[in-house]
Amino acid sequence: MAAAKSEELDICAKTLDKMRVGVGTVIGTWIHTTYYNVIFSWFMYYFYVSFSSPLPWAHCGNDWNTPTCISQYVDVNRTGYNMTDNGTSYTVTRDINSTAAIMTAEEEFWRFQVLDVTDGLETIGSIRLPLAVCLAFTCCLIFLCVFRGIRVTGKLVYVTVTIPCILVIIFLIRGCLLPGSADGIYFYIFPNFEALSRPQVWIEGCNFALYSLGLGMGSIVTLSSHSNFRNNCFRDAVVVCIGDMLVTLLIGFAFFAIIGHVSYQRGLPVEEFESSGFNLAFIIFPQVLNYLPLPQLWSALTFLTLLTLELDTLVPPIENVVAALRDRFPHLSQRRWLVIAVLLTTNFSFGLNYITQVTGTVKIRGGIYVLTLVDWFAYFPSNVLFSTLECVVVGWCYGTARLQDDIKLMWGKAIPLAMVISIKFVCPILLVCVFCYSLYSYRPPKYGDYDYPPWATGIGWMVSLASILPFPAVFVWRKFLTSLKPHKNWRQVSCSTQMDMGQPMANMEEPS
């Protein structure tokens, strides 16, 4: 019975292998890890400067600040004017005749000190040394965690997930006490029906669900291999989906409470607050830390928690790539440390591209532009394509009947009919719609107000195709090689048969 089930399970794996979906997901996962390491190094840099007193992003009296900087503290060494709102004193260090956009001290620290960013992407220049050191330390730390095995890091999940939830609740409570937070929360919960009528909003929501749950890239399959054979996988899937949704909503309330206050401080409506993506984590979190008692302590704890969460995010993809290499090359199983070391060395090498300065006629620091370009193309459309193929292979090639039998064998019950219908029909159709509409509504990459040149967009598509091309290329190559090999029905014929084949009309009767 076990042998038969093992043989059936192998059908699905071989089908995916022949389609080379696994190769594409491994390449895509590796690309993701190259810039996840850089995000980890950013958290590490913030953790390091959290021990400064005062916090470097809490005021506008630093060398990197501009005349348009604003903060909640009075800066005696800078020209500006004082402003008080609801008992909170602000100093707006700005030339009143200037038309430049106002930035908070936290935003200027992120843009001009951490990233050292200015105008755009041109020619690769020098490397940001502080971030390079953090990146090297990141790779060493990940090596120690993955080298010991995923079971060790799994024991830390209870701590690294619980503590961030507690901190987010504290941020939410503190944010609700700040002026302007109600506007941010109202903007978050009040539906914009005009926006909901646009398909792009639903497409973005679907993409976020795939990204947040880590679907389609093989990490969940790798992690599931460590579960007990009798594990209730259906219960785990439901709990993970519901938990992810609730935590996302909680973080949204906390973030928009602070966004409302930042918009109030900058004198702009919430709708015009343009910071998004990477900027949110590195502007909004520091913003709220300034209003907590003992901000250095809270800052260190916050970014230490973010470091542990990012570590949990990095370990499954790294483990996924390592497992794929060991399965493909079994002789590497005895040298796991070497595989991990080589993998992280390549991650470090490519990660340097994301922390470089870019110089042209004007000195431009472009690491964030390179990272944004890769992030723009690395995830889509490859992830949606792989998710669709996995649904087709499991639902139609392998078959939901076999899947039901396998799940019954594992924990004694079958999955609901609704899930079977979703695997065979709903998910593939929705994913195909997302894929097609995303291609139809494609727009070039953009970071803030900076539009990428056409050559950069071309490089971005090359990054995207790097994980997609193995699927059609290997399929065509295998068909080509198969056509050159003798078929099993080919055989050597006898001389008489050859003579008959040489004179095909000989055996035919002449017409009377």
Image: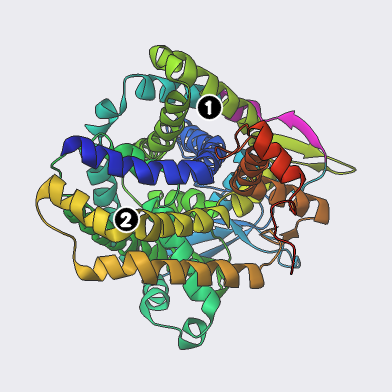
Residue at 41% over, 55% down = 393
Residue 400, horizontal then vertical, whole percent: 29, 60
Which quadrant would residue 342 be assigned to in this image? top right
Range of residues picked out in magenta:
123-134
Indicate yes or no whether the magenta region holds residue 124: yes
Disc on res. 171: 2
Which residue in the rendered view is the most extreme toward the top? 334
Residue in the picture at 47% in, 66% down: 431
Residue sticking out furthest to the left = 412
Placement of the C terminus among the 4 image quadrants:
bottom right
Classed neighbour count for the residue bearing mark 1: other residues with Cα under 10 Å, few (<14), some (14–19), many (≥20) = many
Are the residues at dot 2 and dot 1 in contact (C-beta closer than 8 Å)? no
Q: What residue is at 43 percent from the left and 19 percent from the top?
A: 330
Instruction: Depth check: give the residue in front, 397 or 283.
Output: 397
Q: Amino acid at mark 1?
A: Cys
Please identify the quarter of the rendering in which residue 365 is found.
Answer: top right
Is residue 28 in view from this perspective? yes
